[in-house]
Image: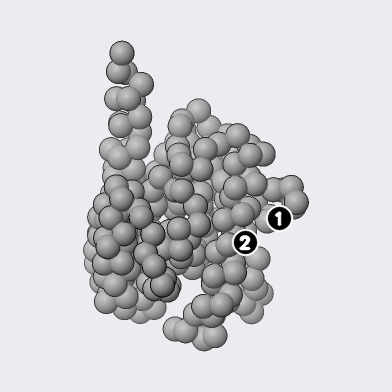
Amino acid sequence: MKAELSYVHRFIPGADRTTLLLLHGTGGDEGDMLPLGRTISLGSPILSPRGKVLENGMPRFFRRIREDVLDLHDLKYRSGELSEFVREASTEYGFKLDSTVAVGYSNGANIAASILLLGLLPLSGAILFRPMAPLVPDQLPDLNGVPIFVSAGTNDPLIPGEETSRLANLLQRTGAEVVLNWESAGHGVGEGEVERARGWFQTRFVASARAQDARP
């Protein structure tokens, strides 16, 4: 199946080395995260799919039984399905999986965390806004040295702080280099928070790539 048929999506070429995989929250679509992605990295290629699951007409990346209970069977299935799409897209559009950073919000952050914890894609990093620990795998993957920026709201009515801390702990146990950022905020993401994520990304990916290119 061709990549353009497996998910409704947008792909925007870019000159930079690192591709951003943008994953929207409940009710978003393939255009929802584009402004955020461009703030984080103006020059990166962007792949932005729309979730296939509908909840009361709103796109999501996987089902949930109720607001605070995820459908783990569907989560695992959809994580594999989305990972296969990203692989197809990398071939079709010519970007490298190991130079791809997932940027997810809420539902999108949770499926990104699931893909990481299940070891489904060799992502080079992730930025996760308002995530929880979506699952605990039978065996943790080796994510040694993978940089991950996790951002949570101390007043988030949907994601308890201990859930975000549990995810950060799981990711640290894989060997990932986790930055856990706490904001005095609710479930929404503010401009200052995005700027902090942008600074982290620029330091970890853009500056390091330039340093590598400058080596004789």
**Would residue 155 be visible to someone looking at this image?**
no
The percent coordinates of residue 109 (x first, y second) are 44, 62
- Residue on which disc 1 sits: 6
Against 135, residue 40 (above or below) is above
Question: In the rendered view, does 32 fall on the left or right side of 127?
Answer: right
Tag 2, which secondary structure?
Answer: helix
Residue contact between numbered discs 1 and 2, judged by CB atoms under 8 Å = yes
Q: Residue furthest top?
A: 216
Which is nearer the eye, 172 or 133?
172
Q: Can you see residue 3?
A: yes
The amino acid pointed to by label 2 is: Glu
Relative side of 215 to 27, left or right:
left
Q: Residue at x 57, y 46 (%)?
A: 47
Which residue shows up at 68% across the image and 56% down it? 7
Horizontal relation, residue 83 to residue 155: left or right: right
- Using the image, determine if residue 202 lies above or below residue 74: above
Mark 2 crowdedness (10 Å alpha carbons): few <14, some 14-19, many ≥20: some
Q: Which residue is mark 2?
A: 81
User: At which x and y percent is residue 181?
Assistant: 25, 59
What residue is at 39 percent from the left and 59 percent from the top? 141
